Structures are given as C-alpha cells and as structure tokens.
C-alpha cells in the first residue's frame, strides 16, 4: 500500500513538473521583453511654471512624481517591504512559501485567493498583465517575475514599483501619495504616515484614510506591527506611531502662484501641439509670467472691480442661519458647516455675522478667524437700486446686517475687513515686455472657476478713445504735427439707412473750438479726432493701423473708427501699445518661454522677435548705401542723418546683454532656465513699423495724457516716464486704460460680459485707471525712471498755443513744441485769432454738416 502511495505521489510530482515545463515552453516565448521596462515611460502630468520656477498648475488624471530609488526614504522602503514582501531581497522573484500557502488555501476551500504575490510579481502584473484571478494569468505572472529578476536588479524593480503602484485618489506612486494625502514630500512623512501609505497597495479604496479612516487605521497598525516584528522600528517608535491619529485629507499639488487663466492658455496650447499625450508625458512648461507681477495683477484687478461694486450699492447678504442651538456643543461647528456651503470667489471670504454694534460688526470666517468690520468698511453699503442710483446714506450697521447673516468679506488690514459682494462686472489686465512681447502678467477675470472666459484674449470690445493714438500716429506720419490746429465743433453725419443722424459729442457735451492735436489727444476731444481721420483718409488709416498688428476686419471703414468703434481684445491693444513703448517696433505677445520633455530635455524654446535698435540701424544704413550705389549718387548723408554702423556680432551682443541684465534683475538661483539661456537660442529682430521720430512725438503726447490730461490720476506714482491713454465707449459700456513706460506695457479693462452701461461717470479714468496704477506701482517699484531720448531729426520750436504757428518774441501764449525737422511751422502767429485757453470756454455755434 505504501509503495502504491509513494508511486502515486512521485507520478503526481512528475506530472506536475512536466506540466510546469510544458507551461514554461508555451508561455515563455509569449512573454514581453523586459527591455521595455527599462524604457518604460510613466504617465506624469503636465506642469506649468512661472518664469522663476514657481508652480502654477498641474493637469492630468494620474498624479505622479517619479523618483529614483536612492531618493526614497529608507524607512518608507522598510514600511513597503513589511506590508507587501519582507523577503523581497531574498527570493528570486517568486516566494515559494507564499505559493504553498495559496495552494493550501485552494485545496482546503476550493477557492482561489490571495497569496504569494511578491513585489516583482506585482510589477509584472501592473506593467504587463490584467488583474483577473485565473490560473493562466498567475502562471504568466510567475514566469514573467522570474524573467524580470533575471534582467533587472532588485533596486530597479523596487523603483518601478514605488513609482507605478496605484494608491487611490488618482495617486500613482508613493511620492504622489505623500502629496495627495498629506501635502508632503516622502521624506517629510512621519512613521505613522509612511505606514499608512505603505498599506494602500493591498486595497486602495478599502483602506483609504480619507474615505475609510477606521479601516485605514487597522491596516496602518498592521503595517506598524510588521515593522516592529522585523526590527525595523523600536518599541518606543512603534508605540508613538500607534498613538498618532489618522489625519489624512486630499491635497492638491500645492501651487506657488495663482494664475489659472495663464494655466489654461498653456494647457490649450500644449494639447494643440501634442494631443492627449500632453497630459501624461510629463511636460514641464516654463512661462514668461513673473510671480510678483502676476500676484500684483490678481490683487489690482480684484481691488478695482470691488471698488466699482461698492460705488453702486450693496445687493444684499448671501443667506442667514440661526446662530445658537441648545443641542450644539460648539456652535462654531454649525457655522463652519453653513459657510462651507457658500461658494468661494476670488479673494472673497465667506463669513457669518455673530455680533453687531451701532456702527460696526463682528464676523466668523470659514477659516475660523474673527474679523472686525468697522464703519469705514460698512458705510458704503447703501441699497443698490440700479447702476446709477443707490439708497439713502446709512446711519447704523443694523440697517444692512443682523446676527446670523452670511456675507462675504475682504481683508482690509490685520483684524479688519471690508463688507463685500461678488462683483457682477468683469475685468481684465495684461502686461507685456515691450522688447520682445513676453507676457509678464495676465488675469482674465475676477475668478477663473466661476467664469473661464478669458477676457484678455477672448473679449472683443470697442477700445474707445484708447484707439485714438493709432489715428494720431497715422496723421503725424502723414505730415501733421502736434501743433496742427483742428476745429473742435459740432458735426452731424447723415447716411442712407440710418433713422437718426449721428451727432458725436465730447464726453463733457461741450465744444472748444480750434485745438492743437497735442491738446486734443490729452483732453480726448472726439470731434477733433473725427475731423483728423476725415482729413487723412479712412482707407489710409485702416492700412496704417495694420502696422500695429490689428486685423483689417476688426476696423470699421467709417469715421467712427476715430472714436475706437472697432473691436479688439485687451491683448491685441497691448501689442499695439508696445510699439509706442519700444520706439516703433512690432513684437508679438508670447507666453511659453521653453518646454522640458519627459526626460528633462529642452524640446522647445521661444523664438520671439526682439527689439534690436543696432540691428535695424545697420540694416537701414546698408539699404541706404545700396540705394546710393544704384543711383550712382556721390552725396553722403549729412552728419545729423548718419546712423552708427555696427556689426552683426555687436547687434547680437546687444540682445544677449539685455537678456543677461533681465536675468540678473530676477536674482534667480542657477536653474534649468538659465542653462537653457546659456545655450544658443535663435533670434529674430523685430521689424520697425513707425520711424523713431513719429514714435518719439507720440510718446511725448501720451505723456501729457498723464501729466495734464485724462490720466492725471497716475501722477500718484510720482514718475515722469509714464505715458498712456484712457478709453471710454458710448454709455460707458467699456472702460480702458492703456499705459506704458520703456520697460512695461499694461492694459486694464472693465465692463460687463454682456455689454451694458457701467453707470454715470464710470470712465476709463475711474473704472480702469486705478487697476493700472495699483499694478504699475509694483511693476515699477525697483526700476529707475527712463528718460525719453530725443532722436535725430527732432527739433524744439517755440510756438503760439492759440495757432500752432511760430510764436512772436513777446507772445504771452507761447510754449515749446517738438517737430520733425522737415515739418517745422513757417508762419508767424496771427494775433487776431480768438482766444481758446485751456479754460475750455465752449464754442457751440459752429456746425458742419457732412454727408
């Protein structure tokens, strides 16, 4: 009998061995090549960074931060081994003890179960196989694990596992899990936290510390117990870790900079370039946005829109709750619950009013802070009636609030806050470097998550008077001067198909008679601009405006063009104004500086057109020489017209020196960006679209907008190198301020998304200029004033302010004016001309009918 049993056992062993051999012969040729593991590209999300390396956003379903084996903390590796495979460094990829346990379970219960799955086998399954429990899949897993162990080191296998394994909440790998559950780097985790994440591979949902904290604690304590048994931790460490409460919660990758409109622009561009792979290939996009300027843009826009909202009255509280409950142990818990139901918006803080004084209120915020609302921050909240009317002045806080009201507040100063309301008006602010068009700050609305409509790039609005400088530039280039006199008098336009004639007016409703162009621009005289456009020609002006990058289709071919009746986005207007700031060169706005690929290599660098005065002067001198040679002329340029000759190498050195100076100004630590810039980068020289004399004259005229015109509010910045133009459209539907100095161009806009009047007196100077000022205060904080250099071909002449002609020696109304040398007035002033001092005495009886 014993002999028969022994023979049967040996036969079974032989059959089993033959079966395994047959399976090996059948399966092995079909196994994938292990080399693919070495080249395996883990799915890593798209990340967007600011100019200085600050993280702006992350896009992608799989949250993963790949690390090398040596970068993982030794204690975390021990926790993983204790939880999953403590014999990992001893077995050949297959733990036969575990397999025997699984076999015994099958014989005893007749069911397949867990057991014997080593880390190497999990790598095989996660990279190559399905998760279904079948005998064939298990054999594939075993043979593949053996093959992996034969071709990869233990450290390489463990590195793949630590980076690949799914750990719940879209976290793949332990570095991502550390961030998602604890907002930390792996090396920052406590012992208990390491044990918690190490216990997740077995069942990421069942043992998830956010979803099932009780089960997660059981699993964590099991892992800690295994670490203790294996002498990875001491008794004291074990007890301290057991005592630590479960405190995990979902953390996003902490963003260093709030710039969601920028992030969305980058995401859209990357998807258009690389398709869906943009979300998984680990691209790192470094933008031109500067963190401190972006933060200033965010704050300036929100401050401006909230100020507009306060001017038009309070539209009521967000809700109301009962403050105190007999059943509650801590009433603030119910307050917190109610505040969590209130949506956040921009920098508004949901707050519940818990106490009122006669002219003050106290609130409790969602963050658990106590804030004081003094009368200065409450008295504005007169009842909103419509955009032009508010209720009577307030005398006490109880006229607008009562305890239990849920409101929004905005921090004003430590401990004090403004009462606030979510603005219904929209806004935009964008800032460019005029030397190459780099977008240094961009904010497309009050809150991206409430409205993803990017008003900087998508809002096609009428620019109003902010377009006038382009009309005036075309006129100056055609021979007009800053002293040219044009009559500011009523005009009526009749056209077929119009029910009513068009009777444009100045904003004041008055007319001021003969007016110099300089004065007309800084006073924003509409009638002068219309007559000027008529004189130089609509077609000419439309063609000329295209020099600034404007599209012909967006510019109407009628006299309303003089008042900015075309449609432009704030970014398009900013591009146009860079030409004034940089002396006459057209640059294209760009946002992406460079892109790093999956392996950290540079796969794309920006190639913007850059202002290079020396390059253009060399080109113009060369063209002039060629023209003279062709014409056979022996005449040399006069000394005043000569251009300094420079070599191509000197021209390139000028651009490189400017880049280096900018990098030094940023005081950046050595980084990948600097390494990129040290290598050769292609350069394009920006084209000159207006000559330096015209650019100079327009710059001086727009400086007067701030010195003595509609932009006088910017004098608070106490700088003399600022220039710009306000813009206000019909019925105050759009409010603009476009301004610049030599180093920065910034456009601020306010208006409703569905165009409607902003309200009486809501001009560009009131609704948009304050945003511009707040931003420029930061943008110019560390830069010195830039003098405006007078180019060759410009002369200064004393003129009579009443006529624009040369002034008599004894003229009481004389001033100095700039002219191009070939456009200096030749006549003397007629002293019989009626006075038109800047006191703006109306001249309203001169009407011209135009058909």
Image (cartoon, rainbow, N blue to C red):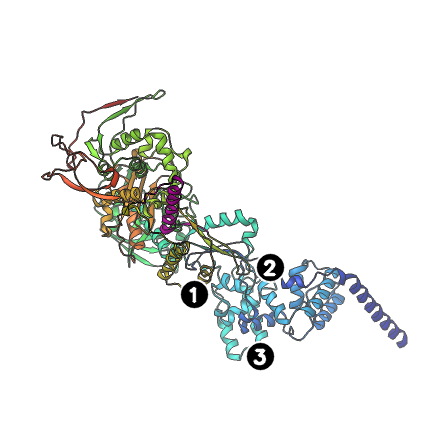
Query: Is 156 in front, or is 814?
Result: 814
Q: Where residue 322 appears, x then y in whole percent?
A: 36, 51
2 and 1 marks in contact (CB < 8 Å): no
Can residue 345 be spotted in the picture? no
Q: Where residue 795 appears, x then y in whole percent?
A: 23, 44
According to the image, label 1 marks what residue? 670
| 754 on left or right of 828 | right
Marks counted in the figure total 3
Query: Is 641 in front, or is 499?
Result: 641
Magenta span main SS: helix
Task: Say few, some or many: other residues with alpha carbon within 10 Å of mark 1 (under 14 / 14 to 19 / 20 or more).
Answer: few
According to the image, label 3 marks what residue? 231
* Residue 41 badge: 2
Q: Is mark 3 on a helix, strand or loop?
A: loop
Q: Where residue 188 appears, x then y in whole percent?
A: 47, 69
- C-alpha span from label 3 to label 1: 42 Å
In primary-sequence order, the first of circles 3 and 1 is 3
Can residue 749 be spotted in the picture? yes
Query: In the picture shown, does residue 815 fall above or below 150?
Result: above
| Residue bounds of the magenta highlight | 607-636
3 and 1 marks in contact (CB < 8 Å): no
Q: Where residue 754 appears, x then y in whole percent?
A: 38, 36
Depth-wise, is mark 2 or mark 3 nearer the camera?
A: 2
- C-alpha span from label 2 to label 3: 36 Å
Q: Is residue 94 magenta?
A: no
Image quarter where the N terminus lies is bottom right
2 and 3 marks in contact (CB < 8 Å): no
Task: Say few, some or many: other residues with alpha carbon within 10 Å of mark 2 (under 14 / 14 to 19 / 20 or more).
Answer: few
Query: Is 715 in front, or is 119?
Result: 715
């Amino acid at each position: 009998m014993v002999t028969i049993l022994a023979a049967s056992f040996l036969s079974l062993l032989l059959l089993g061995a033959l079966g395994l051999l047959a399976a090996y012969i059948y399966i092995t040729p079909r196994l994938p090549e292990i080399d693919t593991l070495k080249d395996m590209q883990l799915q890593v999300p798209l990340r967007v960074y600011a100019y200085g390396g600050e993280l702006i956003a992350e896009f992608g379903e799989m949250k993963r931060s790949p690390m090398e084996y040596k970068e993982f903390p030794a204690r975390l590796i021990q926790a993983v081994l204790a939880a999953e495979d403590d014999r990992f460094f001893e077995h050949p990829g297959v733990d036969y003890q575990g397999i025997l346990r699984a076999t015994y379970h099958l014989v005893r219960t007749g069911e397949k179960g867990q057991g014997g799955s080593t880390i190497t086998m999990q790598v095989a399954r996660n990279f190559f196989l399905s998760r279904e429990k079948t005998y064939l899949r298990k054999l594939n897993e075993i043979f593949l694990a053996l093959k992996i162990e034969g071709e990869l080191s233990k450290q390489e296998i463990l590195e793949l596992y630590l980076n690949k394994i799914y750990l719940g909440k879209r976290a793949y790998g332990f570095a991502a899990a550390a961030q998602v559950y604890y907002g930390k780097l792996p090396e920052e985790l406590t012992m208990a936290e390491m044990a918690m994440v190490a216990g997740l591979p077995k069942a990421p949902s069942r043992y998830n510390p956010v979803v099932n904290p009780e089960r997660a604690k059981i699993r964590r304590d099991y892992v800690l117990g295994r670490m203790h048994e294996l002498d990875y931790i001491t008794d004291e460490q074990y007890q301290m870790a057991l005592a630590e409460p479960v405190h995990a919660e979902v953390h996003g990758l902490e963003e260093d900079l709030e710039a969601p409109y920028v992030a969305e622009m980058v995401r859209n561009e990357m998807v258009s370039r690389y398709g869906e792979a943009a979300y998984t290939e680990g691209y790192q996009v470094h933008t031109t946005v500067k963190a401190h300027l972006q933060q200033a843009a965010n704050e300036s826009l929100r401050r401006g829109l909230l100020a507009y909202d306060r001017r038009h009255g309070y539209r009521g509280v967000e809700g109301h709750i009962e403050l105190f409950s007999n059943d509650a142990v801590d009433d603030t818990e119910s307050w917190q619950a109610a505040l969590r139901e209130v949506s956040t918006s921009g920098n508004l803080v949901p707050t519940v009013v818990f106490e009122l004084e006669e002219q003050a209120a106290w609130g409790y915020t969602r963050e658990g802070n106590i804030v004081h609302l003094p009368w200065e921050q409450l008295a504005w909240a007169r009842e909103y009636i419509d955009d032009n009317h508010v209720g009577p002045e307030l005398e006490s806080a109880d006229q607008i609030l009562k305890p239990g009201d849920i409101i929004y507040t905005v921090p004003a100063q430590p401990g004090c806050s403004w009462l606030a309301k979510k603005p219904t008006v929209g806004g935009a602010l964008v800032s460019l470097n005029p030397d190459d068009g780099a977008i240094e700050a961009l904010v497309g609305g009050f809150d991206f998550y409430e409205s993803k409509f990017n008003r900087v790039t998508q809002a096609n609005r009428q620019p109003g008077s902010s377009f006038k400088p382009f009309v005036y530039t075309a006129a100056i280039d055609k021979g007009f001067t800053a002293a040219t006199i044009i009559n500011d008098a009523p005009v009526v336009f009749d056209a077929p198909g119009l029910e009513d004639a068009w009777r444009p007016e100045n904003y004041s409703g008055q007319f001021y008679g003969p007016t110099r162009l300089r004065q007309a621009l800084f006073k924003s005289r509409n009638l002068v601009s219309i007559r000027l456009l008529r004189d130089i020609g609509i077609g000419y002006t439309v063609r000329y405006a295209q020099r600034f990058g404007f599209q012909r289709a967006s510019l109407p071919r009628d006299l309303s063009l003089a008042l900015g009746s075309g449609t432009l986005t704030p970014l398009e207007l900013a591009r146009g104004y860079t030409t004034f700031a940089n002396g006459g060169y057209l640059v294209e706005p760009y946002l992406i500086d460079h892109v790093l690929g999956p392996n950290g290599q540079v796969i794309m660098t920006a190639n913007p057109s850059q202002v290079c005065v020396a390059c253009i002067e060399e080109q113009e001198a060369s063209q002039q020489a060629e023209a003279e040679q062709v014409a056979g002329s022996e005449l040399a340029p006069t000394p005043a017209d000569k251009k300094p000759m420079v070599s191509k190498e000197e021209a390139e050195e000028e651009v490189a020196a400017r880049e280096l100076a900018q990098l030094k100004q940023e005081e950046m630590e050595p980084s990948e960006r600097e390494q990129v810039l040290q290598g050769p980068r292609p350069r394009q020289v920006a084209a000159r679209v207006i000559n330096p004399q015209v650019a100079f004259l327009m710059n001086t005229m727009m400086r007067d907008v701030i010195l003595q015109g509609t932009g006088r509010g910017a004098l608070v910045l106490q700088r003399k190198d600022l220039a710009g133009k306000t813009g206000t459209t019909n019925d105050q539907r759009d409010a603009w301020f476009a301004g610049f100095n030599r180093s920065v161009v910034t456009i601020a806009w306010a208006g409703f998304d569905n165009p409607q009047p902003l309200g009486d007196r809501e001009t560009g100077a009131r609704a948009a200029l304050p945003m511009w000022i707040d931003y420029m205060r930061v943008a110019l904080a560390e830069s010195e004033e830039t003098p405006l250099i007078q180019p060759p071909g410009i002369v200064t002449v004393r003129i009579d302010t009443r006529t624009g002609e040369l002034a008599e020696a004894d003229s009481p109304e004389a001033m100095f004016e700039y002219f191009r040398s070939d456009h200096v007035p030749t006549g003397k002033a007629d002293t019989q001309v009626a006075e038109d001092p800047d006191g703006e005495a109306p001249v309203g009886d001169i009407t011209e009918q135009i058909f």
